[in-house]
Amino acid sequence: MSSSRTARGASLALLSALSFGATAPLVARFGEGIGAFSTAALLCSGACLSAVLLGRIAPVAGAPIERVHVFLLVAIAIIGAGIGSTLLAWGLQRAGATTGSLLLNLEAVFTVLLARALYREPIGRRVVAALAAIVSGGAALALDAALVATWSLLGALAIAAATAAWALDSTLMRRLAERDPVLIVAGKGGLGAVITGGAAWIAGEPGFGAAPAIGLVACGATGFGLSLRLYVLAQRNIGAARTGAIFAVAPFVGAALAWVMGDRAAGAWTAAAAALFALGAYLIVTERHAHAHVHPAVEHDHPHRHDDGHHDHVHAPPFFGEHSHPHHHDAFEHDHEHGPDIHHEHAH
């Protein structure tokens, strides 16, 4: 894959991880005394709100959502926004901010395996080494936390289940990565808010104050809405597996913020974890993958540029920059650096 496209995708994935990772300890703090369904509903509401605002402030190209994508979007909303967010909220209330943040490392493992199984994304030795380094960093943090943290088995299992739900959510979302991110994030957040809000009403969860509600909505806007937007854009460039692997930096961010907030003091294992996370991100950013491959004839609609070596059709008048519209590709073969984007989902 081209170095610029790889770097762009890796940077977006890293920013997504930073945005999401910082919210775990804050959700644990603001969500004290609030039901899990209510917490999830507020987070989803914030995600929907931020999607709409960002769409107006900083729009990006994306193909429209079509009828065939509606069922997939509903499934993603149920799995990721409904089930995943609720399990996270419930687990954080019992496992604590630091432990919860560390357990988020499991999502990277699940995502890479699912991306390989569903989309045949190539997982070479370099990506395996990167994932091993990142997961080892999470293990180092877990060892550090185990020295002082009080573990809750049920809370830990709930957060682990949440990461599995998000991994499936993220992998399925790969099919929507070329669509309008505003519609994806707003649709997922809005549907998730309706589902979890209805569940909170049915469960008879108690009311809550304005301050924690505002805090959770803000967490949803940044850690779920903004993060998901960046995640979708990263998938366009480097696919689901590599985006998921870099996203594993999020637990370190959450654990670091938990320490700052007084949850616990950093130990020697933390330095080792930071080095391992940095090594994993470096291996993915500097990955190179090139070989002769065939592009079959296809007609589709997705964001593209005319300087990427795959889109040489003309516009009258000429159009520059990224844009989206239905277009046709003739079959051809060539050899260049590439990643598992929409044009390079071939088998290896």
Image: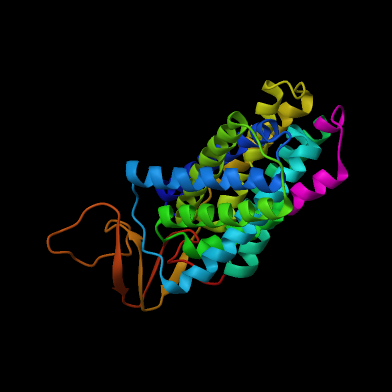
Is residue 260 toward the left or the right of residue 122 in the image? right
Tell me what residue is drawn at x 26 percent, y 51 percent. 321
Q: Residue 39: percent from the left, percent from the top?
A: 65, 43
Picture quarter with the C terminus = bottom right
In the picture as drawn, the residue positioned furthest to the left comes out as 317
Task: Tell whether position 150 is magenta.
Answer: yes
Q: Is residue 293 visible?
A: yes
Residue 318 lies in what quarter of the image?
Answer: bottom left
In front of the other: 348 or 281? 281
In the rendered image of this protein, does residue 118 appear above or below residue 304? below
Which residue is rendered at x = 47% and y = 69% of the image?
69
Q: Is residue 105 visible?
A: no
Main secondary structure found in the magenta portion: helix
Relative placement, left or right, of 133 versus 240 is: right
Observer-nearest of 293 and 133 = 133
Q: Give percent across and percent down for residue 154.
A: 85, 47
Looking at the image, residue 118 sits to the left or right of residue 232; the answer is: right
Q: Which residues are magenta?
A: 145-161
Picture mark count: 0
Image quarter (top left, top right, bottom left or bottom right) of the N terminus: bottom left
Rendered image quadrant of residue 192: bottom right
